[in-house]
Image (cartoon, rainbow, N blue to C red):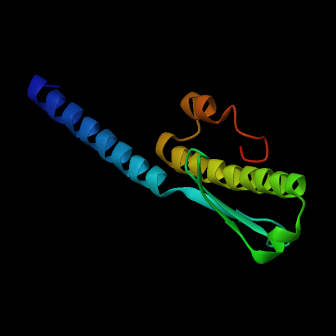
Amino acid sequence: MEPAQWLAEYRDRLERAAFGARQASESLQQTGATATSPRGEVTVSVNATGALQDVKLTPPARRLEAEALAALIVSTSREAQRIAAGRMAEVMAGYLGDNAALTQITQHLPAEVVR
């Protein structure tokens, strides 16, 4: 293979990789999740990293004791984080494929998230 041809093919591979990375990044920025408590008192939204974005309380939440409400917010947040982690793993699997890099990214996720 001539150097010019090798360089052109290498440049094409780099451009495809950069395009894929941009697509994965855009997908991750749009990934997040919302979860609602079983009886609907609390709704929590998180971003792709699981960081809390929003908490909404309905009128029935006011009837809960403070400790019960706090526990409900935490458990609902964990559910939203679990959903967001699953979505993040799906995006990264599409970008990376099933390989060691994906294993490194997903090794700390809850078992029910990782395929």
Establish if 36 lies above or below 18: below
Say left or right for 36 vs 105.
right
Residue beneath the point at 78% across and 50% down: 74
The image shows residue 46, relative to residue 49, as above or below, that is below
Q: Quadrant of residue 33?
A: bottom right
Q: Residue at x 53, y 50 (%)?
A: 91
Q: For the N terminus, give its image quadrant.
A: top left
Q: Residue at x 49, y 39 (%)?
A: 96
Residue 22 located left or right of residue 4: right
Is residue 114 found left or right of 72 in the rendered image? left
Q: Above or below — where is 18 with respect to 75? A: above
Q: Horizontal and vertical percent for residue 22?
A: 34, 47
Front-most of 7 and 114? 114
Residue 85: % across, % down: 64, 47
Query: What percent of the width, then of the height, locates residue 55?
Result: 65, 61
Q: Residue furthest left?
A: 4
Q: How many marks?
A: 0
**Residue at image coords 54%, 30%:** 101
| In front of the other: 59 or 43 | 59
Q: Pick whichever, 34 or 95, lies toward us.
A: 34
